[in-house]
Each structure stands twice: as C-alpha cells, then as structure tokens.
Image (spheres, rainbow, N blue to C red):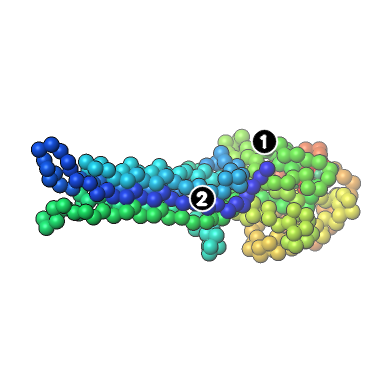
Amino acid sequence: MFIDEVVVKLKAGDGGSGCVSFRRERHRPKGGPDGGNGGKGGDVILVCNENVGDLTKYKFIPHARAESGQGGKGNDKNGKGGANTLLPVPPGTVILSKKTGQVVIELIRHEETVVLLKGGQGGQGNLRYKSSINQAPRQSTPGQLGEDGVYQFVLKTIADVGLVGFPNAGKSSLTGLITRAKPKTAPYPFTTLHPNVGVVEIPEEYARFLMADIPGLVTGAHADRGLGHRFLRHIERCPLHLFIIDMAGVDGRNPIEDYEQLLRELEYYNPQLLEKPHLVAANKMDLPEAPINLQLFQKKYPAVEALPISCLLHSRIEELKNRLYQWLQKEAANP
Ligand SMILES: Nc1nc2c(ncn2[C@@H]2O[C@H](COP(=O)(O)OP(=O)(O)OP(=O)(O)O)[C@@H](O)[C@H]2O)c(=O)[nH]1
Ligand SMILES: [Mg+2]
C-alpha cells in the first residue's frame, strides 16, 4: 500500500487551570494564597523523517492530539506541562489547511521539525493575584485552549530525476538496472502501481542521486484514464525529467506520437512541468524497428537529447547513468 494523501484532524493540548488555594498550617491561620499555575498544553509537532516512506500511518489513524497541561495545585505547585505529540512525515510532505486549501508548510529536509499547533498556556493560580491591596485573592484563570485544525497532508516525493513514460516503456526495468530498488517489471501495463524512489550510485565520484519511478501515463490520464495524473505529483519537484520511450513501438505504438502525447499529458497536469528540462531514453534499441524510429525522432526533434539504450541487453545503461549525473552536476553548479 502506498498512501500519498490524507486528511488529519489535530489538536494541541489545553493549558491546565490555575488553582485557588490558601495555606492552612498549624499556627498559621491565615497563611495567604498558594494556588499554583496550570501547566502548558503539549504542541503538535511535525518531524520530517527520511525513513518514513509514505503517509499510510495517517490513513488508519487520521487524528492526533497532544496532552493537556495539568491544573495547578495548592502549596504553590504548578501543574505539569502536557507532552508534545510528534508526527513523523516523509520528506516532501506538504501540509494544507483543509478549510482554506492554502499551503501551511512543507517539510523537505530530514529531521526538520515544525510546531504546527501550539498548546494552550496554563492559567494563573491565585498566588499570582496577590497584591498589597488584595492579600487573599480568590481569582485564578482557566488554561487557554490548545490550537486545533483539520489538515490535508500531501506527499510530493523528492528525487533528482523523475521518470515519465507510457506503461511498458521500461521505466521499472531501468530503475532495476541502475538503482538498488527492485521494482517489479512485466510485459503488461500498470505493473507499477505506486512510486518507487531508488538511489543511483556513482562509485567513482562517491556520489549518488535519487530517481523516481512512477506508474505509466496513458493518453487521457488527465481525464483520469489509467491510473490518472495523480502520480505526476511525485515528479513535480524533480529538476530533471527522463522520458522513457519504447523506440521499437511494441504493441503498435508510435514513438514520436508517444513523445508528443507525454508532453501533452504533463501540460494538462501542470503547464509549468514543460518548463523543466528533459532528456529522452530511447529504450528497446535491441528490437529491429528501433534504429529507424530513433532516426525519425532525431530528425523531427533535433534539439532533444535522445540516448539510445536497451534495458534487455543492459546496453549503454552506464552511459545514460553518467549523463544524468553530469547533467545534475551542471545544474548544481548553475541552478
Ligand atoms: N525488448 C526489450 N524489452 C524491454 C526492454 N526494456 C524493458 N523491456 C520489457 O518491457 C516490459 C515492460 O517493462 P517495465 O520495466 O515493467 O515497464 P514500465 O515502464 O515500468 O511499465 P509500467 O510499470 O506498467 O508503467 C517488460 O516485459 C520488459 O522486459 C528493452 O530494452 N528491450
Ligand atoms: Mg513499472
């Protein structure tokens, strides 16, 4: 199961009430006020954790609250503060207010923490109201209520390279070859049902980058055909897109039309995606139809960098991997 969108109801702890109390001791008949303050309510805190893969945890328990502060007590004892509630979320989680639809915060870096809802302050006990003109105050204040809200958590995966392609183009085959992720590959469409992020290692450089494999797009994905558009959010943040095209046109596909259709589907989802740079991996070059199709493609789109590969034969995969790394390096140098 992979859950990338949930609605969660959250509440921070209430502050404890202040206490009204008077000292009663032997030989001190009017010992004066000694009511302590209430404790502060716990906060609801988001913690970004790279070991959390998705938002499944919140699908099953879509609510959380932090502990309330305890009331103050006599003998000038302050109430104990309520414990904070920590909510782990994967990097790339966007928090939106359900009421306004506005983005409240995004958590990107591992261990980043954000107080989403503040606990209420504790109320004051009657000791705090003692003054020269009021030696025996009976006032105290109740604790403040903790903040609450309903939020939508949306995960937008963070990766350097996002794979875009039709089903069966070979996205998962490539991911399996250059990362340690082992996504399922099979000769039928929609083998991949949810995004997988794999780490690509460049041992010579002691470097690595992340690549996101998502389910295949189909024509009309914007109208919810196939698995629809929803997984495109997982490549929205990638600085580089790698279009994987079946250059052999297996199943009667036309690689040039496939390329144009992929561009259209990205545009329907979000026109800004077209402003992102992309490279093309021309896959299945082992099949006889592929070389001529690649020539036609390059003739029509001379400015698009198309790298011929064959996942089946493991051919020119290293070259593609190094080209992606080189591109990301250049991007890092002049963002
Ligand atoms: N001949 C040939 N077949 C390939 C090549 N690369 C992948 N395939 C085959 O194409 C089929 C689909 O590969 P996948 O990697 O599962 O494709 P995908 O793009 O991840 O597909 P979805 O997850 O369904 O979107 C599998 O049967 C692969 O064996 C290649 O270079 N040459
Ligand atoms: Mg796949």
Report the Cα–Cα distance between label 1 and label 2: 25 Å
Closer-to-camera residue (235/56): 56
Pick whichever of labels 1 and 2 is earlier in the sequence.
Answer: 2
The quadrant of the image that shows the C terminus is bottom right
Mark 1: secondary structure? loop
Residue 332 visible: no
Determine whether, in the image, residue 53 is placed left or right of residue 20: right
The residue identified by callout 1 is 180
Q: Going 11% across and 58% down the picture, which residue do you hit?
A: 133
Please provide percent x and percent y for residue 183. Answer: 72, 39
* Residue 296 position by quadrant: bottom right
* Residue 301 position by quadrant: bottom right
Closer-to-camera residue (102/251): 102
Please provide percent x and percent y for residue 107. Answer: 51, 50
Mark 2: secondary structure? strand
Residue 123 visible: yes
Determine whether, in the image, residue 173 is placed left or right of residue 335: right
The quadrant of the image that shows the N terminus is top right
Residue type at tag 2: Leu
Q: Going 31% across and 43% down the picture, which residue do you hit?
A: 79
Q: Going 89% across and 54% down the picture, which residue do you hit?
A: 252
Determine whether, in the image, residue 67 is placed left or right of residue 237: left
Q: Going 61% across and 52% down the picture, which residue do you hit?
A: 5
Please provide percent x and percent y for residue 160. Answer: 61, 48
Residue type at tag 1: Arg
The residue identified by callout 2 is 107
Q: Quadrant of ligand 1?
A: top right
